[in-house]
Image: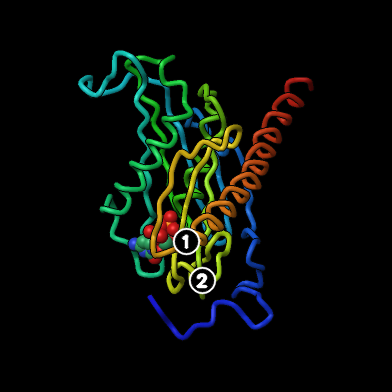
Amino acid sequence: MKSDIKLITDEGKRLDGRGPHDLRKIKIEAGVLHRADGSCYLEWGGNKVLAAVYGPREAVPRHTQNPLKAIVQARYNMAAFSVEDRKRPGPDRRSVEISKVISEALEKVILTEYFPRASIDVNIEVLDAEAGTRCAGLSAAAVALVDAGIPMRDIPVACAAGKIEGQVVLDLGKEEDNFGDADLPIAISPRTDEVLLLQMDGHFTVNEFNQAFDLALKGCHTVSEIQKKAILEKYQSVVAEVQE
Ligand code: CDP
């Protein structure tokens, strides 16, 4: 959608004062829910996301079971109050799509072959949405999976880059997403840089696409460090409690 809003000032600053290569502020806390096997609360700019993991547990109904490996079922949901116009509760096309791509991304790193016939369920609740919720949701789900003790090859992480006013920038905010030219959310396994998810909205030239991809990749590595810090913080405090 084009608009008269100027997304980059003459000084090269974005609407919220960020430079082109800056991420929004991110805060992650692991293990915030007591009833789930693993959980995470994540704030990413104005996004607030809660992720809860259950399992591995017997997959039901039984016809969904795979005798060779666990199934990974992520369910992305936006709270009715998470967006400006109240969102109709329940799944819609968008949330079904996001649930599917997140499930497939997580399945690539989880050692599903350890748990035949089981299900690993990942609930992602978006409480407040301000663009980039699939990246926030996937990154929160990854921390919740670690908190649940699910064996994984790596801790997956997601971040987007986009294009506003013809310039490639990292991590689009709400107005930038609404009125910008393109958005490229990716998820990777940070140890190998294997791509687990890649979606694209809008148009990039090949050169812009490469620039955006490299920028999103760097963003992923920054978010990955914050994820690891959150996990360490939780388990260091658990160790301290045990020692006491
Ligand atoms: O959130 P993400 O960027 O992964 O997905 P999107 O489909 O590109 O949505 C971008 C943003 O639009 C969301 O983060 C919300 O802030 C907003 N949105 C909304 O206001 N109402 C909806 N029903 C869906 C999205």
Q: Nearer the viewer, mark 2 or mark 1?
A: 2
Q: Is residue 121 left or right of residue 36?
A: left
Given residues 108 and 45, the one toward you in this image is: 108
- Quarter of the image holding residue 212? bottom right
| Residue at image point 39% right, 31% down | 121
Q: Can you say whether 15 is above or below 53 in the image?
A: below
Q: In the orientation shown, which residue stands out farthest toward the right?
A: 244
* Colouring: rainbow
Q: In the rendering, which numbered label is found on residue 143? A: none
Q: Is residue 77 left or right of residue 143?
A: left
Three-letter amino acid code of the residue under disc 2 = Ile
Q: Tell me the quarter of the image containing the C terminus.
A: top right
**Res. 81 visible in picture:** no
Disc 1 within 8 angstroms of ligand 1 (CB): yes
Q: Position of residue 32 (x, y in %)?
A: 57, 39
| Residue under label 2 | 164
Please state the horizontal and vertical placement of residue 105, each as a whole percent of the image. 43, 37
Quadrant for ligand 1?
A: bottom left
Q: Secondary structure at mark 2?
A: strand
Q: Earlier in the sequence, mark 2 or mark 1?
A: 1
Real-space Cα separation, disc 2 to disc 1, in angstroms: 14 Å
Q: Position of residue 96 (x, y in %)?
A: 29, 47
Instruction: Name the outermost residue toward the bottom.
Output: 4
With 128 as the anchor, is 233 left or right in this view? right
Residue found at x 52% / y 27%: 148
In this orientation, which residue lies closer to the viewer: 150 or 191? 191
Residue 131, labelled with which disc?
Answer: 1
Placement of 35 over or under 131, stated as above or below: above
Q: Determine whether 100 is above or below 244 in the image.
A: below
Looking at the rendered structure, the kind of residue marked 1 is: Ala
Query: Which x, y percent locates residue 92?
Result: 26, 53
Please report the residue visible at 46 percent of the width from the left and 67 percent of the height from the top: 177
